[in-house]
Image (cartoon, grey):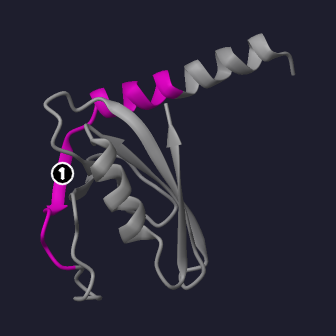
Amino acid sequence: MEAAVLTTLESEFWDYLDRLVAASRVVIDRPKGSRHPRYPDFIYPVDYGYLEGTKTIDGGGLDVWVGTRHEKSLSALVLTVDLFKRDAEIKLLLGCTEDEQAQILNFLNGDHMRAALIMR
């Protein structure tokens, strides 16, 4: 593909995600400082939840991390691969600072999971 076509497709990809976020209510079901329901040693470093009315392969809503920036725009996403669950997921980062992005990556890169940050 030509570079101009790839640039347009990438721009449209982020636009589609923006539209999905704008049309959905963010639900925080695991606030910063709370423990994971099955793994109590895992403490959420940033508010974590999902976009209401969306669906992913696991049947839940599209995962979101919501940071402390006033503007809750989509600045990045995290791709995860979990060998224990044998799946891969996308997680949206809304209003996250660079420090919060690092905390999220540290949280997700555990024994059986790896995560990569994709900046906008």
For residue 69, which quarter of the picture? top left
Q: How busy is the neighbourhood of tag 1: few (under 14 within 10 Å), some, or many (20 plus)?
A: some
Q: Position of residue 2 (x, y in %)?
A: 85, 16
Tell me the residue that label 1 is attached to. 27
How many marks do you count on the picture?
1
Q: Position of residue 117 (x, y in %)?
A: 50, 49
Q: Residue at x 24, y 79 (%)?
A: 36
Label 1's element?
Answer: strand
For residue 22, which quarter of the picture? top left
Quarter placement of the N terminus: top right
Q: Position of residue 61 (x, y in %)?
A: 35, 55
Q: Residue furthest front?
A: 99
Task: Answer left or right for 110 relative to 3.
Answer: left
Q: Residue at x 27, y 41 (%)?
A: 97
Q: Residue at x 55, y 69 (%)?
A: 114
Q: Of residues 64 and 44, which is closer to you in this image?
A: 44
Using the image, determine if residue 105 lies above or below residue 11.
below
Q: Of residues 58 and 109, which is closer to you in this image?
A: 109
Using the image, determine if residue 30 lies above or below residue 35.
above
Task: Specify the segment rendered in magenta.
Answer: 14-35
For residue 46, which quarter of the picture? bottom left
Residue 51 in sight here: no
Q: Residue at x 38, y 25 (%)?
A: 19
Q: Position of residue 21 (x, y in %)?
A: 32, 33
